[in-house]
Image (spheres, helix red, strand yellow):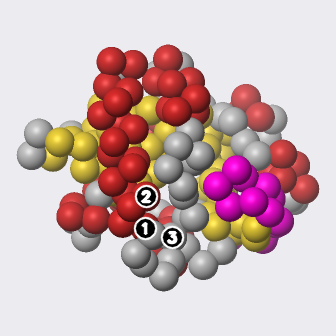
């Protein structure tokens, strides 16, 4: 597998990776609603890099995919009746999972999700959770393929989308 933890020295390259994806997402009718330097923000990227939470998938000497894996959730998660009863330190979340358009369709996102599942299991966490902006069709198809179960739709605020409906998914471990 070509997936590894990124380092703080890669900040500018990772930022450029996310800018590339954001530019492409502006051309498609579905997507997560990301905006350059708002989500993921430079501060979020730096934080994830310094905490060893940002993973990159390399192919042909460049970043083909990236994601953040940690236990930080939006306050909207507390509004939901989750299937698994777990404290914040007993769950893993996937954030900002993206694959460059030129590498899509090769199973990279699936490999990244499988890796996040393995990370959560290695920490003996009870569940893996995430949210998807309603209408983000690729994500709505990806996660159920890996056993994630739709839990609820909740209105949540993020800097890039404002107040919007997010579908919440959970994978019991």
Task: Kindly state the secondary structure of the residue where label 2 is placed.
Answer: helix
Distance between the alpha carbons at the discs numbered 1 and 3? 6 Å
| Mark number displayed over residue 137 | none
Query: Residue furthest toward the bottom?
Result: 29
Above or below, comparing residue 165 to residue 44 in the picture: below
Distance between the alpha carbons at the discs numbered 2 and 3? 9 Å
Residue at the spot of label 2: 22
Q: What stretch is highlighted in magenta?
A: 150-163
Is residue 67 covered in magenta? Answer: no
Percent of width and height locating residue 42: 52, 33
Marks 1/2 in contact by CB < 8 Å: the verdict is: yes
Count residues near mark 3 (Cα–Cα under 10 Å), then give few for <14, some for 14-19, many for 20+: some
| Foreground of the two, 95 or 8 | 8
Residue name at image x 68 percent, y 61 percent? 161
| Foreground of the two, 112 or 138 | 138
Residue name at image x 33 percent, y 18 percent? 9
């Amino acid at each position: 597998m070509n997936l590894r933890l990124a380092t703080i020295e890669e900040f500018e390259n990772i930022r450029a990776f996310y800018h590339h994806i954001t530019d492409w997402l502006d051309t498609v009718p579905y997507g997560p609603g990301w905006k350059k330097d708002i989500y993921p923000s430079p501060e979020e990227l730096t934080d994830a890099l310094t905490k060893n939470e940002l993973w990159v998938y390399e192919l042909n000497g460049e970043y083909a995919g990236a994601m953040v894996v940690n236990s930080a959730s939006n306050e909207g998660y507390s509004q939901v009746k989750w299937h698994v009863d777990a404290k914040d330190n007993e769950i893993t979340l996937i954030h900002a999972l993206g694959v460059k358009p030129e590498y899509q369709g090769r199973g990279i996102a699936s490999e990244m999700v499988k890796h996040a599942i393995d990370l959560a299991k290695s920490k003996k966490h009870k569940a893996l959770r995430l949210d998807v902006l309603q209408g983000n069709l690729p994500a709505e198809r990806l996660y159920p393929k890996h056993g994630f179960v739709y839990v609820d739709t909740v209105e949540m605020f993020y800097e890039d989308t404002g107040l919007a409906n997010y579908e919440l998914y959970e994978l019991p471990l």
